Amino acid sequence: MFGYIRIAKPELKVREYETYKAVYCTLCRELGKHYGFLARFTLSYDFTFLALLMLALEDGCEGFERKRCAFNPLKKCHYCKDRSRFAFPAAAAMVMIDYKIRDNIADEKGLKKLGNRLIRPLFARAGKKAVRQFPEVGEIVSAYIAAQNALETAGCTELDRAAEPTAKMLASLLRLIGKNEAQQRVLERLGYCLGRYIYLIDAACDLPDDLQTGSYNVLRYGMTGDARAYAKERVVPQLYFAGNEAGKAFELLDVKKYKGILSNILYLGLEETFKKELAV
């Protein structure tokens, strides 16, 4: 994904931050174990949030254990003892990166296109393995890429329409982790709002570079004045709205544990992230 769903670290309690790191490190370990060492480099905060949310909706807790870090054998990290819940976010991460690389090969030019061609074989096998385990994830991501490509090819100038594929993709992914229809509807709404947030902040951050390269960016249509200032003016109110709506959906969930960490991400982390990224 994009790495925009982050914690507001200064506002977390020490034990909450240690728990968050343990989930992050456990997901890193699972990526390496099932998809190879290089898969660890694809780890993002977005899928850490997904793993944490899945754990938070389950009763009980198997606790944590200390083991050596794969990157630094001299260091020990905390890991979750029960890693059964990490298969889904790990697979989703692999499917996403595989499809993203394929999409980049089709869209990019020059050195960027060559670079994606070179790394594609490293992740193609992992992506296929993940799809075999969770075929529904492959269908969701494939539909997302196709819908996004169609809008970009048509030169979509409407911000809401351009954000829709990302919003629907994350809505569908989060719906998969629900245990019943009521929970699935709430998770779908949460995912939709976070998907809009991700698309909007990514488009705003990429606008200056996209203007130079000629790449598609919905914000370039109707732009006046400085690119960064224009992007902030267009998206910041919508980022606040998407974050607030995500928080409302979250409050409807029966969260069994880690509510403090998840609340930190949704109520503080989202705002802190876009203010930092967009220099608001």
Image: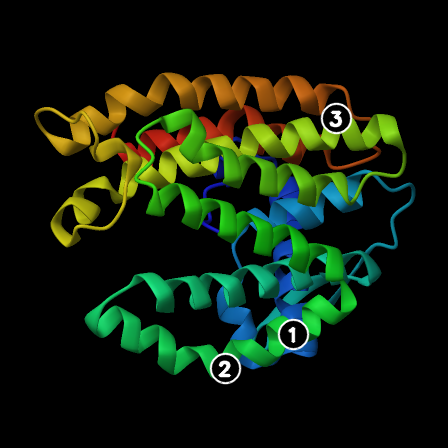
Q: Quadrant of the C terminus?
A: top left
Q: Residue at x 49, y 69 (%)?
A: 41
Residue 132 position in % (x across, y down): 75, 71
Q: Nearer the viewer, mark 1 or mark 3?
A: 1
User: Gap between marks 1 and 2, in whole Å?
Assistant: 12 Å
Q: Residues within 10 Å of mark 2 (few under 14, many from 20)?
A: some
Q: Earlier in the sequence, mark 1 or mark 2?
A: 2
Residue 128 image label: 1
Q: Earlier in the sequence, mark 3 or mark 2?
A: 2
Q: Contact, CB < 8 Å: mark 3 with mark 2?
A: no
Q: Give the image quarter of residue 231.
A: top left
Could you say which is closer to the camera, residue 117 or residue 183?
Answer: 117
Say if 18 sits above or below 134 in the image: above
* Whether residue 195 can be seen here: yes
Badge 2 amino acid: Leu
- Identify the secondary structure beneath mark 1: helix
Per the image, the residue denoted by label 2 is: 122
- Identify the secondary structure beneath mark 2: helix
Q: Is residue 153 left or right of residue 18?
A: left
Per the image, the residue denoted by label 3 is: 186
Q: Residues within 10 Å of mark 1 (few under 14, many from 20)?
A: some
Badge 3 amino acid: Val
Badge 1 amino acid: Lys
User: Gap between marks 1 and 3, in whole Å?
Assistant: 30 Å
User: Gap between marks 3 and 2, in whole Å?
Assistant: 36 Å
